Amino acid sequence: MSSDEFDPMIERLFARTPQMPDASLFATDVEAKLASGSRVRTLALTVAGLVGGCIAVRESLNLDFTLSPAGASSRALGQGLQGVSADASGAIQGFMDQFGLADMSLGSMGGMQLFWIATGALVALAAAGVVRLSQET
C-alpha cells in the first residue's frame, strides 16, 4: 500500500468517532464530578475572601491618617502587625482548646518551629488531597 492510499484511509477511519454504549452515563458522571468540585472550590474561595475582607476592613478602620514622622508610622505599622498576630494566636489557641490541646502554647515557640509545623500541616494536606484524587479515578 502506498503512502498516497494510506493517509486518506487513516483520515477516514479517524474522522468519525465510534459511539460507546455508555456515553451518556459517562457524560453525566463527568458533569457531576465537575459540579461537586466547583461547589467546594466556590465555598472555600468565598470563605477565604470573607475572612480577608473582614481583616482588611478592620485594619483600614484602625488606620491613622495624621501626618507624623516616618518613625512613628513604622512603629504604628509594627504595633498593628503585632495586634494581628496576637489576634490570630488567640483564635488558634481557642481552636486548639476545643481539641484538648490547651497546654500547647504557640506564643512560646520560635519562628522556625512554627514554620516547620505549618510545613508539616501543608504536606499532610497535600497528601490527603492526592489520596482523595487517586480514589476518585
Image (tube, rainbow, N blue to C red):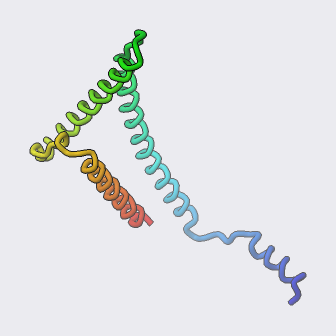
In the image: residue 90, left or right of residue 18? left
**Near-viewer residue (130 or 136):** 130
Name the image quarter holding the C terminus: bottom left
**Near-viewer residue (111 or 94):** 111
Q: Position of residue 133 (x, y in %)?
A: 41, 62
In the image: residue 43, left or right of residue 5? left
Q: Residue at x 37, y 57 (%)?
A: 126
Q: Which residue is drawn at 15% across and 43% down?
A: 105
Q: Residue furthest top?
A: 66
Residue 51 found in image quarter: top left
**Near-viewer residue (4 or 25):** 4
Name the image quarter holding the N terminus: bottom right
Q: Where is residue 110 in the image (x, y as percent from the top left)?
A: 23, 45
In the rendered image of this protein, does residue 53 appear above or below residue 16?
above
Q: Residue at x 40, y 9 (%)?
A: 66
In the rendered image of this protein, does residue 51 appear above or below residue 1?
above
Count of marks placed on residues: 0
Q: Position of residue 14 (x, y in %)?
A: 74, 73
Q: Where is residue 44 in the image (x, y as percent from the top left)?
A: 39, 42
**Near-viewer residue (101 or 45):** 101
